[in-house]
């Protein structure tokens, strides 16, 4: 396979995997909180507190991006709310969709949490856990080198705190349905521009000028998503053990239906 195309496949695999894991985590984290408290409102509060760092970054990303793009903002809330359909809204930012907003600016505002969340996960992974050394050790296939790299990861200062922050940020950075509302129009406009460039004979320039930078960006996305998946696997194991243990002790189980919850 062409190395230039690897980041595309990497993101194509890790992004849906992370989405699936995020949905599982949101449901079962809320379920564990419900088993502990026995009351829906208290369960939602505990659930929201656990993800608070990620929700805060999510909503601040919307607010700051809107302000930078000259879009008038309203209130910002981090108070969880249970909607009529049973879903939970962990937070929101109000901004005014005037005639001049347009799909480009609205799409950028909607994508802001994914961008800032990815950057935060990368910064923690690169500067705290030194995942670059870990990746090189995995590629080398040397047990001694891999053991040393893993030892450096686990011996990082405040290891559990940073691990939790990756968990909270990565599980609140995905755009909600309202965040993605303008994306189809934006992608359509982008497609029109690309087709126009191809018709005008700019195919070679586009491939040479865009493929490299896009592959680099996707490479960083794939790295961040892979790190988030690795951390999520640890927390999924913990959540599963807690849910099974508490269910057995209390003699009750949580029945899951359509109970998604995301910041908006």
Image (spheres, helix red, strand yellow):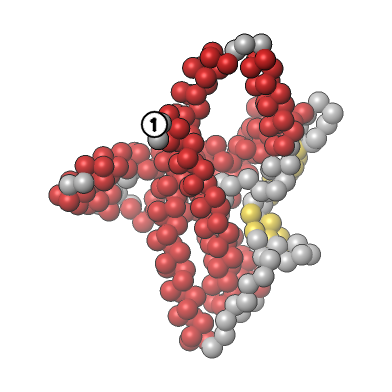
Residue, disc 1: 3
Residue 78 vs residue 263, the one in the foreground: 263
In the displayed structure, 68 sits above or below 208; it is below
Left or right relative to 130: residue 28: right
Residue 130 spot, x, y in % from top left: 30, 41
Residue 63 makes an appearance in the image = no
Q: Is residue 110 above or below residue 258?
A: above
| The N terminus: image quadrant | top left
Towards the viewer: 89 or 230: 230
Residue drawn at point x = 59 percent, y = 47 percent? 174
Question: Where does the image place residue 231, in percent across and percent down from the top left?
Answer: 41, 55
List the single residue furthest toward the left: 144
Horizontal arrangement in the rendering, residue 5 relative to residue 56 (left or right): left
| Residue ranking furthest to the right | 99
| Residue drawn at point x = 39 percent, y = 50 percent | 162
Viewed as shown, does residue 107 lie left or right of 221?
right
Relative depth, front residue between 231 and 21: 21
Question: Residue 232 falls in which quadrant of the image?
Answer: bottom left
Residue 84 in view: yes
Question: Residue 24 at x, y = what percent?
Answer: 55, 63
Q: How many marks?
A: 1
Query: Which corner quadrant of the image does residue 45 belong to?
Result: bottom right
Q: Residue furthest bottom?
A: 251
Q: What residue lies at 45% left-to-right and 41% top-to-bottom?
A: 10
Query: Which residue is drawn at the image coordinates 45% and 32% (left, top)?
Result: 5
Mark 1, secondary structure of its residue: helix
């Amino acid at each position: 396979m062409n190395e230039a195309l690897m980041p595309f496949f990497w993101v194509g695999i890790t992004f849906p995997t992370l989405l699936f894991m995020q949905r599982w985590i949101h449901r079962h984290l809320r379920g564990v909180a419900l088993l502990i408290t026995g009351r829906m409102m208290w369960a939602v509060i505990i659930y929201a507190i656990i993800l608070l760092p990620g929700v805060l970054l999510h909503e601040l990303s919307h607010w700051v991006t809107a302000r930078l793009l000259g879009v008038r903002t309203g209130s910002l809330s981090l108070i969880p709310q249970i909607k009529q359909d049973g879903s939970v809204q962990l937070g929101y930012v109000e901004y005014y969709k005037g005639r001049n907003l347009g799909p480009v600016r609205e799409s950028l505002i909607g994508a802001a949490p994914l961008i800032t969340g990815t950057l935060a996960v990368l910064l923690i992974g690169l500067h705290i856990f030194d995942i670059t050394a870990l990746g090189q050790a995995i590629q080398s296939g040397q047990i001694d080198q891999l053991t040393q790299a893993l030892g450096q990861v686990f011996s990082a200062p405040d290891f559990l705190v940073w691990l939790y922050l990756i968990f909270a940020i990565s599980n609140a950075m995905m755009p909600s349905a309202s965040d993605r509302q303008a994306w189809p129009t934006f992608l359509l406009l982008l497609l029109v521009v690309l087709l126009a460039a191809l018709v005008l004979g700019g195919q070679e320039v586009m491939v040479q000028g865009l493929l490299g930078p896009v592959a680099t960006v996707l490479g960083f996305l794939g790295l961040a998503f892979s790190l988030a998946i690795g951390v999520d696997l640890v927390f999924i194991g913990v959540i599963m053990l807690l849910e099974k243990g508490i269910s057995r002790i209390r003699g009750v189980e949580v029945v899951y239906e359509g109970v998604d919850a995301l910041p908006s």
